[in-house]
Image (cartoon, rainbow, N blue to C red):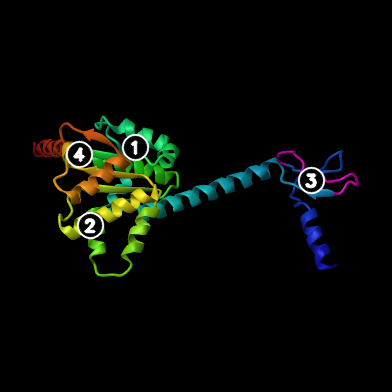
Amino acid sequence: MTDFEKILKRITTPQVNPGDYAGADGLLYCGKCHTAKQFRMDAQGHLFPRPCQCEQERIDRELAEQEVRRHQQAVADLKRWGFTDPAMRKWTFANDNGKCRQMKRAHFYVEHWNIMQDENIGYLLWGSVGTGKSYFAGCIANALIEMEIPVRMTNFALILNDLTAGFEGRNDYIANLCRAPLLIIDDFGVERDTGYGLEQVYNVIDSRYRSRRPLIVTTNIPLHDLQHPQDTAHARIYDRLLEMCAPIRFSGETFRKATAQDKLARLKNLMN
């Protein structure tokens, strides 16, 4: 038997299990689900194997399990790359405590991601410390990552540390930041307010602007100060941000204070 004949025999010979039987139509049937394990390919009556119903269900289950494992690994890889702080991986809609009144805007952003991406629409999340801005942004990031969309969430303090570390390839570093479909800059405004620092901040913001990819920024700087910058260096940065990002205000009692009060109450209960 030639190699071709061996291959032909393998692909035309169904697997016969105990209980299988020949039907009145001359096809082999599964003894469990009683569906055909063969089909006629042409007018000459050549028979070829095919999965019976129970075998096809097994194949479908295995493929589904493989897809789940592939998706989980892809999401894990994206989260490792996307978040500078592992704690951010748990900032999800599922873990939301419901206290942030603006969270519906985060859901809206994710649900309309294709439009946000095409129209280059971002958010400028501004307000007092501890009002949920970072968690809001993290929920968007995690939801998009679950859709296998790369998101990078970092802050300018880390960016400037990398840019001033003395390594070569600063342009490549900024270019890599701008390649992510969504870039999130957390705690904007707490970085070093030096001439060099401001120039690097502008380079990142301007590069993102020219890449026509959306940007989300969280900041404690009041919107009035962003709209009325103190000098030209800040004006260049703030103008770009306001052009790219729709401002959303976060106000009210800080969640951090509420968390501290809850912990104090739990401690008192334990002591009693």
Q: Nearer the viewer, mark 2 or mark 3?
A: 2
Q: Position of residue 63 (x, y in %)?
A: 58, 48
Q: Position of residue 68 (x, y in %)?
A: 50, 47
Identity, as a three-letter code, of the amino acid under mark 2: Glu
User: Which quarter shows the C terminus?
Assistant: top left
- Circles 4 and 1, Cβ within 8 Å, touching? The answer is no
- SS category of the residue bearing label 2: helix
Inspect the magenta stretch and tell me whether residue 44 lies in it: yes
- SS category of the residue bearing label 3: strand
The residue pinned by badge 3 equals 38
Pick whichever, 229 or 67, lies toward us: 229
Identity, as a three-letter code, of the amino acid under mark 4: Gln
Residue 67 position (above or below residue 124): below
Identity, as a three-letter code, of the amino acid under mark 1: Phe
The residue pinned by badge 4 equals 227
Q: Residue furthest right?
A: 44
Q: Position of residue 113 (x, y in %)?
A: 42, 39
Rounded to the nearest whole Å, what is the CA distance between mark 2 and mark 3? 71 Å
- SS category of the residue bearing label 4: helix
- The disc, 4 or 1, on the residue closer to the chain's N-terminal end is 1
- The disc, 3 or 1, on the residue closer to the chain's N-terminal end is 3
Pick whichever, 205 or 144, lies toward us: 205
Q: Nearer the viewer, mark 4 or mark 1?
A: 4
- The disc, 1 or 2, on the residue closer to the chain's N-terminal end is 1
Question: Can residue 31 be seen in the rendering of this structure?
Answer: yes
The secondary structure making up most of the magenta span is loop
- The residue stretch that appears in magenta: 32-46
